[in-house]
């Protein structure tokens, strides 16, 4: 679950299922979402909000995310291409992100905005191969962060494989 989520292209929350299913999410285009709320609110816009609380297998591949704009002026307003949360501790073989493209640029707004291409806030091990992540825009009137990839949590000591990706940050 993403706090203050105002807009999302795909929300995939998979919890409390002990099966051995494999889910494939591929070849989707998520584009042109704009939050026009220009008030001092903390608004989050996410292309793909993914929550995994089980040790299931997932393949997220060939998706295109672009054109997410946020005009909110709150100090915690965020644009995220792919947001990954959950408590699962899956192995390397079960969470695969491959050939996805995320292009985020909030240049139309003069507000300070945090922008993350991929925000990974889970202990589960994942593999990221051949993704293209581009983050751009202006810093507005405040100091905000930006990153193509963020690993925010790893309390269990599981690692990720991040290989042959293109990361470009011009913000």
Image (cartoon, rainbow, N blue to C red):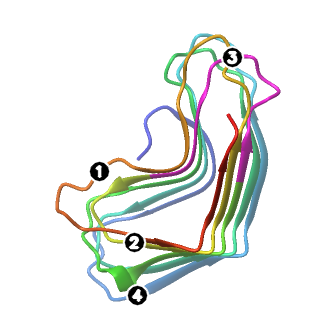
Q: Which mark is first along the chain, 2 or 4?
A: 4
Left or right: 47 in relation to 110: left
> x and y percent of residue 152 in the render?
35, 47
Q: Nearer the viewer, mark 1 or mark 4?
A: 1
Quick one: quadrant of the C terminus?
top right
Circles 3 and 1: CB distance less than 8 Å?
no
The residue labelled by disc 2 is: 126
Instruction: Report the disc number at residue 153.
Output: 1
The residue labelled by disc 3 is: 140
Find numbered disc 1 in the image and state the secondary structure of the residue it sits on.
loop
- Separation (CA) of disc 3 from disc 4: 44 Å
Find numbered disc 3 in the image and state the secondary structure of the residue it sits on.
loop
Question: Residue 136 is drawn in which quadrant?
Answer: top right
Question: Is 113 colored magenta in this rendering?
Answer: yes
The residue labelled by disc 4 is: 21
Query: Magenta segment, which residues?
Result: 103-119
Circles 4 and 2: CB distance less than 8 Å?
no
Residue at the spot 50% in from the left edge and 81% down from the top edge: 23
In the image, residue 108 above or below residue 53: above
Residue at the spot 40% in from the left edge and 87% down from the top edge: 21
């Amino acid at each position: 679950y993403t706090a203050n989520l105002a807009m999302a292209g795909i929300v995939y929350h998979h919890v409390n299922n002990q099966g051995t299913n494999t889910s494939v999410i591929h070849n989707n285009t998520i584009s042109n979402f704009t939050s026009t709320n220009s008030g001092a609110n903390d608004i989050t816009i996410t292309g793909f909000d993914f929550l995994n609380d089980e040790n299931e297998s997932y393949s997220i591949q060939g998706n295109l995310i672009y054109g997410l704009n946020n005009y909110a002026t709150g100090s915690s307003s965020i644009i995220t291409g792919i947001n990954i949360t959950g408590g699962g501790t899956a192995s390397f073989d079960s969470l695969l992100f491959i050939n996805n493209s995320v292009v985020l640029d909030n240049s139309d707004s003069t507000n300070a905005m945090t922008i993350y291409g991929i925000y990974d806030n889970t202990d589960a091990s994942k593999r990221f191969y051949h993704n293209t992540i581009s983050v751009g825009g202006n810093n507005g009137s405040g100091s905000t962060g930006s990153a193509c990839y963020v690993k925010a949590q790893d309390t269990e000591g599981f690692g990720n494989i991040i290989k042959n990706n293109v990361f470009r940050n011009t913000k």
